[in-house]
Image (spheres, rainbow, N blue to C red):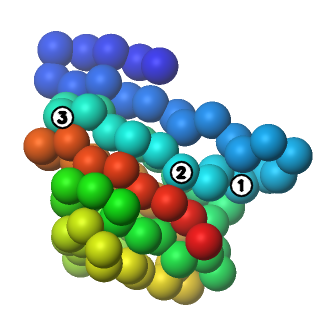
């Protein structure tokens, strides 16, 4: 975990026995960096998430219950400005 005055960056733990991240919870101000998630579906399970893909000038917002299919092989940055949680299916 890296901390600076602006935000806390976390790298979620990998799921048991897999090479991919299964889920995470973000407190306000935390940022999660995900990789190797192409072909997965990101589901916002509570709160709301701000999603940014590497080399993509679009940002995406998911509210609780919404999902986004990840169809690019790029890094993904998630933040929950007011807190939120997610699951990768």
Residue 16: image x %, image y %? 79, 42
Secondary structure at badge 3 equals loop
Q: Are marks 2 and 3 in contact (CB under 8 Å)?
A: no
Q: Is residue 67 visible?
A: yes
How many numbered marks have been drawn onto this rendered protein structure?
Answer: 3
With 44 as the anchor, is 20 left or right in this view? right
Assess disc 3: are there few (<14), some (14-19) or many (≥20) residues with their C-alpha within 10 Å of its C-alpha: some
With 20 as the anchor, is 78 left or right in this view? left
| Residue at the image position 15 percent from the left and 23 percent from the top | 6
| Residue at the image position 33 percent from the left and 15 percent from the top | 3
| Residue at the image position 25 percent from the left and 67 percent from the top | 64
Considering every residue shown, the one lying at the far right of the view is 17
Q: Earlier in the sequence, mark 3 or mark 1?
A: 1
Disc 3 target residue: 28
Secondary structure at badge 1 equals loop
Q: Earlier in the sequence, mark 2 or mark 3?
A: 2
Disc 2 target residue: 23
- Tell me: residue 85, above or below residue 75: above
Disc 1 target residue: 20
Kindly indicate the quadrant of the structure image that contains residue 25: top left
Q: CA distance from mark 3 to mark 1?
A: 24 Å
Q: CA distance from mark 1 to mark 2?
A: 10 Å
Instruction: Point out the image quarter for the C terminus.
Output: bottom right
């Amino acid at each position: 975990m890296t901390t600076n005055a602006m935000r806390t960056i976390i790298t979620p733990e990998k799921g048991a026995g897999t090479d991919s991240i299964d889920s995470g919870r973000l407190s306000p101000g935390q940022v999660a960096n995900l990789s190797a998630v192409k072909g997965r579906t990101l589901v916002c399970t509570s709160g709301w998430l701000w999603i940014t893909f590497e080399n993509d000038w679009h940002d995406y917002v998911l509210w609780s219950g919404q999902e986004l299919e990840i169809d690019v092989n790029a890094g993904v940055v998630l933040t929950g400005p007011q807190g939120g949680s997610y699951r990768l299916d």
